[in-house]
Amino acid sequence: MRRKLIRFQQNWESPNVIETGKPLFRTIKGTWREEYFKNNNPIVLELACGKGEYTVGLANAYPDKNFIGVDIKGDRIARGSQAALAGGLTNVAFLRTDIRYLLEFFAEGEVDEIWITFPDPQPRDKQEKHRLTYPYFLAIYSTILSSRGKLHLKTDNTAFFDYSLQVLPENGFTDLVYTHDLYSSSLNNIHLGIKTKYEELFYNKGFSIKYLQCKKSAADEAAL
């Protein structure tokens, strides 16, 4: 508990953490580039970012893009926040909120890419509505993504991956490219060798890593 309290305090004091009680928490929607990043670079989200390994890794690799890790767990976000600060990364932010509330923090078309990395697969049928590729969430992503914005997914769970392959085209995402074995695929270079804690764990246990990318359809953009 003491360690968690220390991390919560770090979040409160960290300029790269946006959370309830801070001035930007309720005013940042539509103004991330102007108010936080101070540039006009593309914005990339990592949803359910956990300790932020992927967010920080991508930010290191792409200094000309802005990265925002989103998670509800403050003690996890603190790890990524502190790593970004230690690395002197100015193109990283962390937003502490539930993914259900993304529309409160991002305007239509404000985001250019979304990464979903090793989310809870919510395997039971009654848990379907909690899967991060459930149509409810896909509608949110479609709203905040820019025209032809990209969505990426990495998981070790075959059932969840196959479910996602089915629902994405049914909910306005096109140009689907995927593999059931990323590290043996020509798509391997896309993820830059960055591995989250869970990815490393699953991969070392012999699980194949599934990956897909797709784009928001032009028709969805025209409908907004």
Image: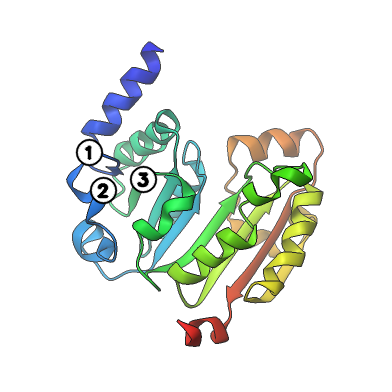
From the viewer's perspective, is the residue at label 1 or at label 3 nearer? 1
Counting from the top left corner in percent of width and height, residue 88 is at 28, 44
Count of numbered labels shown in the rendering: 3
Counting from the top left corner in percent of width and height, residue 19 is at 30, 41
Residue picked out by circle 2 = 25
Residue picked out by circle 1 = 21
Q: Earlier in the sequence, mark 3 or mark 2?
A: 2
Say few, some or many: other residues with alpha carbon within 10 Å of mark 3 (under 14 / 14 to 19 / 20 or more). many
For the residue marked with disc 3, what is the amino acid? Phe
Q: Is residue 60 visible from the viewing direction of this image?
A: no
Residue 211, quarter of the rendered image: bottom right
Quadrant in which the N terminus appears = top left
Tell whether label 1 touches label 2 (CB within 8 Å).
Answer: yes
Q: Which mark is residue 185?
A: none
From the viewer's perspective, is the residue at label 3 or at label 2 nearer? 2
| Picture layout, residue 67 above or below residue 20 | below
Can you name the residue that lies furthest to the top here? 2
For the residue marked with disc 2, what is the amino acid? Phe
Residue picked out by circle 3 = 94
| Picture layout, residue 97 above or below residue 189 | above
Counting from the top left corner in percent of width and height, residue 219 is at 56, 86
